Amino acid sequence: MGARRFVAPVAVGVVVAAFGIWEFTTQHSATPEVVEGWAMPNGSGTAIALHNSDGGRDGGYVVSGVSWADRDGVWHDGADGPTCVGTDTAVKTHVRLGIVDVEAGREGLGGRRVVWFRCLD
């Protein structure tokens, strides 16, 4: 009888651990779409309007808190924002972005999100 009391909790533990491993390895990975264009920042530099090479607007993105690289290729954490884009709303900067599509979860915050940002030439 003692063996049964030991086996049941161990079996439950194995199932829970297997589910956790499955959840972590299958639900939390994404390959970003890489897009390139011309960024025009908002006045605080926390978001950009991305324009394609023809001048048409491809979308708007929040870049605050995103890891970014300056023109020299030096990577920065998102704490200081992408300073290479600046805050002048009339200036365009050539950029490359890594973007993922996020499904709306319980919070309802889905959509396209920038996961990295790089200023070019």
Image: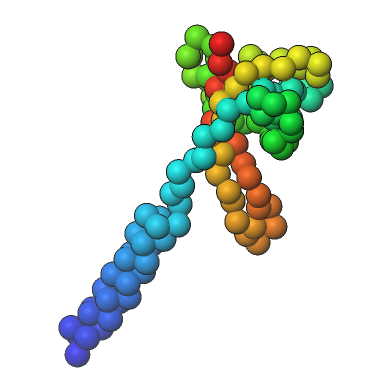
Foreground pick, 38 / 102: 38
Q: Give coordinates of residue 105: x percent, y percent.
A: 63, 59
Q: Residue at x 52, y 34 (%)?
A: 34
Answer yes or no: is residue 78 visible: no
Residue at the outermost bottom position: 1
Answer above or below: position of 105 versus 4: above
**In the rendered view of the protein, which quadrant contains the C terminus?**
top right
Answer yes or no: is residue 41 visible: yes
Residue at the outermost front position: 54
Q: Residue at x 50, y 9 (%)?
A: 72
Foreground pick, 53 / 30: 53
Q: Residue at x 74, y 31 (%)?
A: 56
Foreground pick, 108 / 54: 54
**In the rendered view of the protein, which quadrant contains the N terminus?**
bottom left
Quadrant for residue 67, please give it: top right
Q: Is residue 65 left or right of residue 74?
A: right
Q: Is residue 47 left or right of residue 27?
A: right
Answer above or below: position of 56 versus 80: below
Quadrant for residue 82, please give it: top right
Colouring mode (rainbow / by chain / secondary structure / one colour) = rainbow
Q: Give coordinates of residue 46: x percent, y percent.
A: 72, 27
Q: Is residue 73 left or right of residue 4?
A: right
Answer above or below: position of 15 versus 38: below
Q: Give coordinates of residue 63: x percent, y percent.
A: 65, 30
Q: Residue at x 53, y 19 (%)?
A: 69
